[in-house]
Image (cartoon, grey):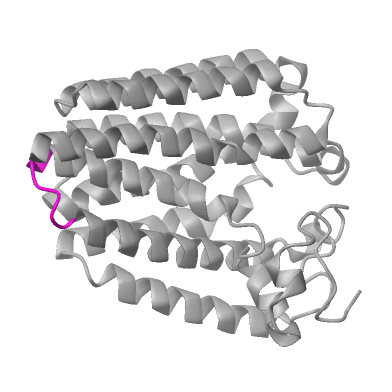
Amino acid sequence: MSGVAARVADATGNWVDTRAPSWSRPYLRLARLDRPIGSWLLLLPCWWSAALAAGVLGDVRQLPLVIVLFFVGAFVMRGAGCTWNDITDRDLDAKVERTRSRPIPAGQVSVAQAAAFLVVQALIGLVVLLQFNRFAVATGVASLVIVAIYPFMKRITWWPQIVLGLAFSWGALMGSAVTLGRIDAATIWLYAGAIAWVIGYDTIYAHQDAEDDALIGVKSTALLFGARTRPALVAFYGVAVVLIGVALAASGARWPAAIGLAAFAAHLVWQIARLDISNPVLCLRIFKSNRDAGLLLFAGLLIDALMRAG
């Protein structure tokens, strides 16, 4: 299991396992490039905000470049965040069936090697961030405080998903900061809605580890809600849709954005109806489907921005 080619239990048969050079595989796994769903979920609020801000500005000329830079930045910084998480959680990961095969507890890389890789990823992220205006740079740097403390939250609170929501929704602030050079009321509403969305989908994700987490003393909303997860999701997903709707109204968005939000909401309803918290495989599948939900909303916001700019 200590060989660099050994696979991670919950991510097998992907391009990292089959095509990447053996020496690179532990680092690609640290960055979660073998399972990019988290990068997509970090990216989507960035794209939402960028499209919404471009619509407010009535100018989409810079939007393609912003979309590309956010794509690169989200994948790199999610990788950095996961590397940091794996460093801080290495002892806990060794006790959980799903995570004990991750590179550090499996002995594929040392803590020092992982730390060096973390620095490299952070520097790439900094290069991307420096392409933006000073306000956006400061806004991006501010997120690092939340990222740094997140891995420790599950040790002290039943609500680590709130802190994850603060971090993973930060992109909802960044799009406005980059495009408009400010954070307005609509942006705050969008950020709040994204936080509620993250709490919902990460509760579903956390149900994969609920039994192991309970045994080792790790806290989560999955354990807190337990059999009440479905009504909790109704509440959080409902709040997400309402707050994002307020953001769209406050920014003057038109009907394409409303259709995108309706499609997003319909997808969340499907998730709640389909969920079975006793089925880890299904929980993971539903969790991953949030990328599609987020893309539906982004499509509506993008069409809205193009219409308003035209």
Q: Give the quadrant of the C terminus.
A: top left
Residue 232 screen position, x and y as percent: 61, 18
Q: Residue furthest right?
A: 1
Q: Give the quadrant of the N terminus.
A: bottom right
Q: Which residues are magenta?
A: 56-62
Helix, strand or loop: magenta stretch: loop
Query: Is residue 157 at all visible to an observer of this figure?
Result: no
Q: Is residue 284 left or right of residue 1?
A: left
Q: Tell me: residue 38, above or below residue 114.
A: above
* Number of numbered labels in the structure image: 0
Residue sitting at x 84%, y 27%:
278
Residue sitting at x 70%, y 26%:
224
Task: Locate residue 7: give its quadrant.
Answer: bottom right
Residue 28 screen position, x and y as percent: 64, 73
Residue sitting at x 16%, y 44%:
54
Q: Is residue 190 left or right of residue 240?
A: left
Task: Locate residue 11: give its quadrant.
Answer: bottom right
Residue sitting at x 70%, y 71%:
16
Q: Is residue 74 left or right of residue 105?
A: left
Residue 258 lies in the magenta stretch: no
Query: Is residue 300 at all visible to an observer of this figure?
Result: yes
